[in-house]
Amino acid sequence: MKRLWLGFFGLVAITPQAIGQASDFPHRTVTIIVATTPGSSADSSARIYAQQFSEIFGKPFVVENKPGADGAIGVMAVKNAPADGYTILMGSNSPLSANPIVKKGLPYDPLKDLKPVGGIFKAMNAFVVAGDSKLNTLSDLVDTAKKSKAPLSIGTSFAGYRLDAKWFSGLAGVSFNDVPYNGTAQVVTDVMGNQLDFGFVDRSLVNPLVKAGKLKVLAVGGETRYPGFPDVATVRESGYPEFLSYAWIGFFVRAETPDDVVAKLASAMPKVAESEKMRAFMEKIGASPMPLGPEEMRKFHVAEIERYRRVAAASGITPQ
């Protein structure tokens, strides 16, 4: 007989046998791998989950940053770890959905090598410039790019941002000099320091900097405007109705990890998502909850890969 646990993340089926098999999990330290540098919204979220998972399970959960290779280093750390649930990936759209579309010889298959535990949040991406920039709208950016003798420099971190930025450049009929980074925090720093003309980043990271006047948002990639910046238009409103771009994060484990262990982790996620600390963090960064359980997260992940495949085809992007 199955017991159905119902919560923020939907239904999770747990059999009596599974409960017995997972009864001693975890009995030692669990590592959450974050494929970005410290300071990203994924990193901050992982640290909140680690701290609260430690309290829920009574065993240490620690965060380990493994940036590099567009997130592939972090993914491989989980793929190569034992399939026992003691190594969790804080997965995101770039390494898990965009990399399979744009990279040749990728050493992992995210659908075959990983199993979803649950979704955490989704946040629209944004075009940003320094606070003292003369550019105020996306139209200003495109007009400047068309008049410039040399391509404007854009900072991006990870393949998802680069893929969507390339998509936009094609829609706008301009070329940009894409400067790749291992983390969004450094992109933002270099935009503020005028070492980059602009950046295309996860909007959830820039709220405080925008409010402080250190950054300006030219447009956001959501379906609707971000409530925190009601005067900032979407890219769609700016003349590119098909454009949509956002970042998302969720937990994944190695594919062979027992379902009962995954269910136990999944059942703890709503407790953190509904906690005061996580709610405050989500409100601060302006992200939208993505309360998906393992099965729902799998469907979402598959759909995201197909979405990026369509973007690549529309942009003429082939694996490199």
Image: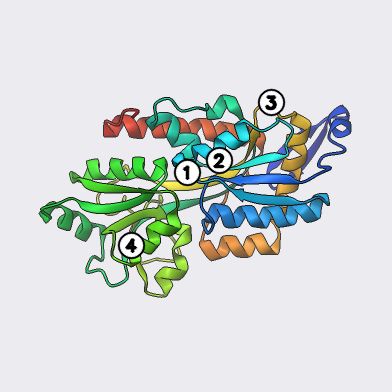
The percent position of residue 88, horizontal first and vertical second, equals 66, 41
Q: Residue at x 20, y 60 (%)?
A: 140
Looking at the image, tell me whether mark 1 or mark 4 is earlier in sequence order: 1
Q: Residue 60: x and y, percent?
A: 77, 51
Sequence-first disc among 4 and 2: 2
Q: Residues within 10 Å of mark 4 (few under 14, many from 20)?
A: many
Q: Label 2 is placed on what type of residue?
A: Gly
Q: Which residue is mark 4?
A: 191
The picture places residue 91, in percent across and down from the top left corner, at 56, 42
Q: Which mark is residue 74?
A: 2
Q: Earlier in the sequence, mark 2 or mark 1?
A: 1
Residue position marked by numbered label 3 in the rendering: 256
* Residue hosting label 1: 68
Label 4 element class? helix
How much space separates mark 2 and mark 1, taking CA atoms? 8 Å
Q: Secondary structure at mark 3?
A: loop
Q: Residues within 10 Å of mark 2 (few under 14, many from 20)?
A: many
| Mark 2 and mark 3: Cα distance apart in space | 18 Å
Kindly report the distance in space between the C-alpha atoms of the residues bearing marks 1 and 3. 25 Å
| Residue at figure coordinates x 34%, y 66% from the top left | 192
Amino acid on which disc 3 is placed = Glu
**Which quadrant of the figure contains the C terminus?**
top left
Q: Is residue 273 visible?
A: no
